[in-house]
Image (cartoon, helix red, strand yellow):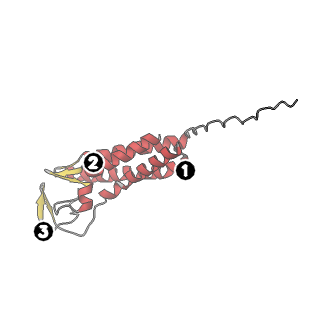
């Protein structure tokens, strides 16, 4: 299970740099949102994350700049938790229930973030806008599911401890014969 949680962390990091959603032909990744790489980043709702211009249109959606921040980069903090928990479990030799609790919380946070953005995506598509969750969102979902499975399995059925090697036999002194 420790390897499963570690893989969930790597998938989350990969999902951070992949496009999270597409509006028209604009692909926006969580990294692009967090780094504020350009002024053409918009949220799936009709509110922009930031912009330098007074008003612009992207994918058929008119965007007006406001001081709102997207939550999308924060969802990928779960990947850091998965990586830390996975590395700690590898060093210790097993994933214990106490160490699995942060992983469980991070998995629920990642899944909740994906569901929130999926709801926004459905609302935009229902209104007739061309919005689509992309590869980064799918990797966030997969990362959350793998972290959830790994954490729940460890909490339900504990991993066996790695057996310690038996101690070496005691040294027996050689007998001396006295005549």
Question: Which quadrant of the rendered structure holds the C terminus?
Answer: top right
Gap in Å between the C-alphas at discs 1 and 3? 49 Å
Asked whether the viewer can see residue 130, the reply is yes
Q: Which residue is mark 1?
A: 98
Gap in Å between the C-alphas at discs 2 and 3? 27 Å
Q: Nearer the viewer, residue 146 or 165?
A: 165
Mark 1 or 3, nearer chain start: 3
The image shows residue 163 at horizontal and vertical percentages of: 60, 37
At 38% from the left edge and 47% from the top edge, which residue is drawn?
A: 9
The image shows residue 5 at horizontal and vertical percentages of: 43, 44
User: What secondary structure is marked by label 2?
Assistant: helix
The picture quadrant where one finds residue 63 is bottom left
Q: Which mark is residue 136?
A: 2
Mark 3 neighbour class, 10 Å CA radius: few under 14, some 14 to 19, many 20 or more: few
The image shows residue 82 at horizontal and vertical percentages of: 42, 49
Mark 2 neighbour class, 10 Å CA radius: few under 14, some 14 to 19, many 20 or more: many
Q: Which residue is mark 3?
A: 53
At 42% from the left edge and 40% from the top edge, which residue is drawn?
A: 4
Mark 2 or 3, nearer chain start: 3
Q: Nearer the viewer, mark 1 or mark 3?
A: 1
């Amino acid at each position: 299970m420790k390897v499963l949680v570690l893989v969930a962390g790597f998938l989350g990091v990969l999902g951070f740099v992949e496009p999270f959603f597409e509006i028209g032909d604009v692909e926006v990744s969580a990294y692009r949102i967090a780094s504020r790489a350009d002024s053409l980043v918009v949220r799936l709702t009709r509110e922009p994350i930031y912009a330098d211009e007074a008003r612009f249109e992207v994918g058929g959606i008119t965007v007006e700049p406001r001081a709102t921040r997207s939550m999308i980069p924060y969802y990928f903090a779960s990947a850091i938790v998965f990586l830390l928990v996975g590395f700690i479990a590898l060093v210790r030799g097993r994933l214990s229930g106490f160490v699995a609790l942060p992983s469980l919380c991070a998995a629920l946070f990642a899944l909740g973030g994906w569901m929130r953005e999926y709801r926004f995506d459905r609302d935009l598509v229902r209104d007739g806008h061309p919005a689509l969750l992309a590869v980064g969102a799918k990797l966030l979902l997969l990362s959350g599911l793998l972290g959830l499975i790994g954490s729940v399995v460890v909490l339900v059925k504990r991993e066996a401890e790695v057996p310690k090697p038996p101690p070496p036999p005691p040294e027996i002194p050689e007998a001396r014969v006295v005549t």
